[in-house]
Amino acid sequence: MSEYLLLIVSAIFVNNIILARYLGNCPFLGTSNRMDTAIGMAMAVVFVITLSSATTWIVQEYILKPFDLEYLQTIAFILVIASLVQLVEMFLQKSIPGLYRALGIFLPLITTNCAVLGVAVLSVESHMSFIKTLVFAFASSVGYGMALVILTGIRERSATSPIPVHLRGTPLGLITVALLALAFLGFAGMVK
Amino acid sequence: MVFVLTAICAGAALVLAYANKATQPAREYQLLKYVQGPSVKKVLKGYDNDPIKDVIEVSMGKDEKGQPINIKIFPGKKGGKMIGLAYSSSAQGYHGQIEVMVGVDMNGTITGISIMRHSETPGLGARVVEPAFTNQFAGMKLSGQLNLSARGGKIDGVSGASFSSQGVVSAVRKALQLFPKVKKEVS
Amino acid sequence: MAAVVREFTKGLWKEVPPFRLVLGLCPTLAVTTAAKNGIGMGLATTFVLVCSNLIISILRNAIPKKVRIAAFIVVIASFVVIVELMMQAYFYPLYKILGIFIPLIVVNCIILGRAEAFASKNSVLPSIADGLGMGLGFTMSLTLLGAIREILGNGTVFGIHIMWESFQPFGIMLKPPGAFICLGLILSIMNWISSRQRSH
């Protein structure tokens, strides 16, 4: 049990996928201007990362490994993720229109969010079991969502402040992320 | 539409299968050079060849599950004559397996050992990688002396980490027990 | 010919990624702890960019509109696998340093972006020029960022000591906060240069 707890704490705080591992920056800066978009994106990320890590784990263990095709990992994973996102989009549109309206516009963006492929590759590389992969993917994506919501909160306030003109937008966003990452550095060493 | 997509995938598969095959020997060499190479260089003495390039794979029978056991032997040569062998061996430590690269000359005397992989406790069992511990093995043969001092041997274990120290000793002993067979296979 | 040259040079300054075209930030931030790593990552990306632009511009009339993104991803991912294999075979230490960011070239938005916005609409020669320009621009930016972080964080550039004897390196520059703050400041400097150019 404590093993899973450590894994969760490590994935959310110590090795936060955006603030410590630099994964998924483009949508991170792109969707952190308004709180409702940020929350929608955060939820979509948690959903897709958890689902796709589980799927890629199965692909790795039952297709790539037995047939000695591990060198095709990258191409197999990205195709699985891209088709999965398409399927989820179609499924949501047909059966849960409410959720589709909330998440729909974020789903196509997620295919090129490197956090999705990144988490899948990371969990395969560290030879995790299926349950561990699920826990790791879920915790990592929650960490991503949390960082996104925190950053959005800060950016919403700074948007109305008098900022030097050249710093407005992405540059200030990046500097804010830097300060956030600095704060999260305080967790370093808590868990290996 | 389906046809074009299939054709692209087939083309990609063909190219990748070829690329995989073409780079395989080079990839294996690099893997040996950078993962095991540094340890091999440390444990062999006085050689003038490239032990990584001359690697020999020998079969050591089968394990309990019937899977063949192959080990990689890195030979050290001088003037074309074989003067020593390096190969890895592992044993249970306090946390999981400890993998040790052992260098042996042709008489079965250890020329050096190097810990390649372990997951022992940092600051405690992990101190088995320090030269103060590993240097004690050089010059020893497979005998009663090759044991921890607590068991009547000549090796002083790392204090507070007898399981980890014993793991290294067991791995080295295992390697030396294989030596006669390995020597016969490579010569 | 002039058009080809223009496609090539736009990637070097006017639309240089990731400073002007803010895409592909993950590798930009992650691997630039040293100038050498920046060059390695940049050249690997350039290779994929040029090759995928080439193939996509050749196939541009054969690929149906509806499945174009899937086809682009297959082409790009294939070249990424080739890069992975080649680096394992010939540049193993660099492969280890860049690690997970080599497979992640496949989701670098610059590459899919150029395939969609340029190579699928233009002929072979301009597409290669576009890929080469964007790729070299990206390499330049990564090397610059890597050099700045290496100098401040380690006192060296390309492994050579250049700072004075008593210089105390800022270790933080090699960590995530240093990466984000460096890129943020560079982007604001780019904004400043653009606004000066406009006012002239």
Image (tube, rainbow, N blue to C red):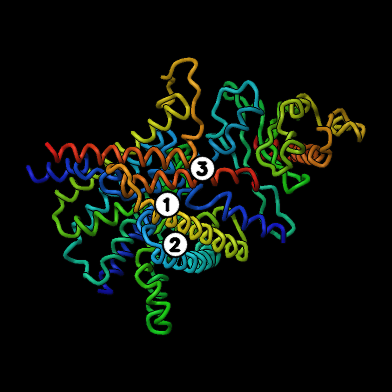
- The residue depicted at 62 percent of the width and 32 percent of the height is B40
Residue C89 on image: x %, y %: 44, 42
Nearer-N-terminus badge (3/2):
2
- Say yes or no: labels 3 and 1 on the same chain: no
| Residue designated by label 2 | A77
The amino acid type of the residue labelled 1 equals: Pro
Chain of the residue that carries numbered disc 2 in the rendered image:
A
Q: Could you tell me which chain the residue with mark 3 belongs to?
A: A
Q: Residue at x 52, y 63 (%)?
A: A60
Residue of label 1: C103
Image coords of residue C142 (percent x, y): 34, 38
Label 2 crowd (10 A; few <14 / some 14-19 / many >=20): many
Q: Secondary structure at mark 3?
A: helix
Horizontally, residue A159 falls left or right of residue B67, namely left
Eye-nearest disc, 3 or 1: 3
Q: Quick one: SS at disc 2?
A: helix
Residue position for label 3 = A182
Helix, strand or loop at disc 1? helix
Q: How much space separates mark 1 and mark 2, taking CA atoms?
A: 10 Å
